[in-house]
Image: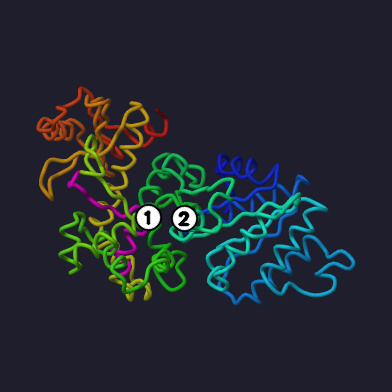
Amino acid sequence: MKFVNRERELAALDRAVGRTPGLVVVSGRRRVGKTALLDHFAGQLSEEGRRRAVFLPGTRAPVAEALRRLEERLRAVAPPAPGDLLDLGHLESWDAALGYLLARSREEPLLLVLDEFPYLCEGDPSLPSTLQARWDHRGDADLSVVLAGSHVGLMEELVAADAPLFGRADAHLRLAPFTWREAALLVDGDAEAALEAALTVGGMPRYLGLWDGRLDARANLTALLDGPGAPLGEEGLVVLQELSPASAAARVLELVALGARSFTAIRERAGLAPATTSEALASLEGLGLLERQTPVGEDPRRTRRVRYEVRDPLLRLWLSLVAPNREAFELGRGEQVLAAHADRLAEAQSAAMAAVARDWLGAREGAACGPWWPSGEDAPAVDALALRDRTPAAAATALWATGVDGDTLRGRVASTLAASPYGRPDVIEVLARSGAGVTTPEDLYAGP
C-alpha cells in the first residue's frame, strides 16, 4: 500500500527526534498506520544521512529473544567497532542495550524505534524505569528514541504523572484514522466511491487501501469479509485484543454495536451494575472504540442526556453482522448475510454520514457543531446543529441514500428544532448520495 498523507505527523517527528536527540511517544489503535509512519520516517532520515535507524518491530517475546532481534538489527545498521560490547559479546539486558546505543550515538546520530513498546514491557516490567535512568544520564549522546504502541491506555500511562517517563517525552503523537476528506487519497474512483468507502469501513489506511472503487459497498464487504482467508475476516478480533473476551467492556461494545445507545439500555441488556457499566464505558472511550455524544449546547460533563456510538464503521459492522454469523462468513456465505441485513448496512452508513455532516457543517460555519435531540431515550436526533454562542447558525441531516427529497427532510429538521431552546436556523442542509435539493459527495469534497 502506498504511503500518503501524515505530513503533519512527519513534521512533528522531525522536530522532536530528527534534527536533535529526543524522545517521542506514538500511540494509536491497531491498523491506524503507526508502523508505516515510523518506517517511512526512519527511511527518510537514513536516506538523507541524518540518522541511521534501528527499528525493532513489535512482538511478544521473552527478553532474551527481543534483545537478540535488536542486536541483529543493530549489527546490520551499525556494525560493531573493534573491541566494543557487540564485538566481544552480546546484549544481555535492556540496560546494557541502551547503554551501548547511547555510547555508539556519540560517534554518529542514531534513531531507535521500539514498536509495540507495551509488549517489551510485558517481558520486562522494569524497562520504562531502565530507560528513564539511562535517558536522564545520557550526556552528549546523539540518540533519538521513539516508543510506539497500539494499547492507547498503556501508552498514556507511560507519560502519566506517576510514571518513570513523565516529563521526558519531547512529543506525544496520538495517531488518528484518516478523515473522510483524506479517504480519497487511498481510494481510486470518484468522490462518491471515496465517501462510500469512508462511511463503510472508516478511516484506517489499511481498510481504505483494500477498497475497490469500481464496486459497491456490498461487493467490497463480500470481498473483504467473506470466506476463509478474507483480508478483514478476523479484523474485529484483532481490534478487540485490547479487551478480555468475556469482560464487561467487550459485552458493552457489542451491545452498542447492536443498537443499545443509552446508559440505561446498555446496563439493562448487559445485566451489569451501574458502576461496572460506567467503568466499561469509560474504558472504551479511552481506547477510542466508543464515542460519547451529548446534545450540542449542553455541558458534556453535567448533562444526563448521553448516547453512545461505536466509532469505527467497520468494527460496528463486524460486531453486528460478522460476529453473530461467523460460521456463515467462514463458509463463504457472508454475501447472503449482507444481503439479508442490507438495512443494517444502510443504518451504519447513515450514522457515519451524520458524523461527516457535523464535521463539514462545523468547518463551514466556523462554529461548535454536534447532534441535538429532544428529551426522551429514543427521540429522533438532528444530525448536526452549528451554534455560535446560543444562536443557531445552520443545521444538517444526512443519510447515505439515493433519490432523496431534500425539502421533506428539511421540514422534519425544522419541526424538531422548533422545540429546541435555540429555534430553527435559516439554513438547513440535507446531505445524501443523490436527490433533489441535497448536498452530494461531489459538493462535500469541493468545500468548504
Q: Looking at the image, is 248 positioned above or below residue 442? A: below
What is the three-letter code of the residue carrying label 2? Glu
Q: Looking at the image, is 255 positioned above or below residue 182? A: below
Q: Which mark is residue 222?
A: none
Q: Nearer the viewer, mark 2 or mark 1?
A: 2
Q: Which mark is residue 156?
A: 2
Q: Residue at x 31, y 71 (%)?
A: 247
Q: Residue at x 42, y 68 (%)?
A: 241
- In the figure, is residue 146 to the left or right of 106? left
Image quarter of residue 310 = bottom left
Quarter of the image containing the N terminus?
bottom right
Residue 321 horizontal/vertical position (percent): 29, 64
For disc 1, the marked residue is: 286
Span of residues in magenta: 303-323
What is the three-letter code of the residue carrying label 1? Gly
Residue 151 horizontal/vertical position (percent): 46, 61
Residue 359 horizontal/vertical position (percent): 35, 37
Question: How busy is the neighbourhood of tag 1: few (under 14 within 10 Å), some, or many (20 plus)?
Answer: some
User: Mark 2 to mark 1: distance in Å?
Assistant: 10 Å
Q: Looking at the image, is 138 positioned above or below residue 272? A: above
Residue 339 horizontal/vertical position (percent): 27, 61
- Considering every residue shown, the one lying at the far right of the view is 82
Q: Looking at the image, is 14 positioned above or below residue 246? A: above
Q: Residue at x 78, y 47 (%)?
A: 49
Q: How is the image coloured?
A: rainbow
Q: Residue at x 62, y 51 (%)?
A: 23
Please tell me whether residue 311 belongs to the stretch shown in magenta: yes
* Element type at mark 2: helix
Image quarter of residue 423 = top left
Quarter of the image containing the C terminus?
top left
- Pointer 2 and pointer 1: residues touching (CB < 8 Å)? yes
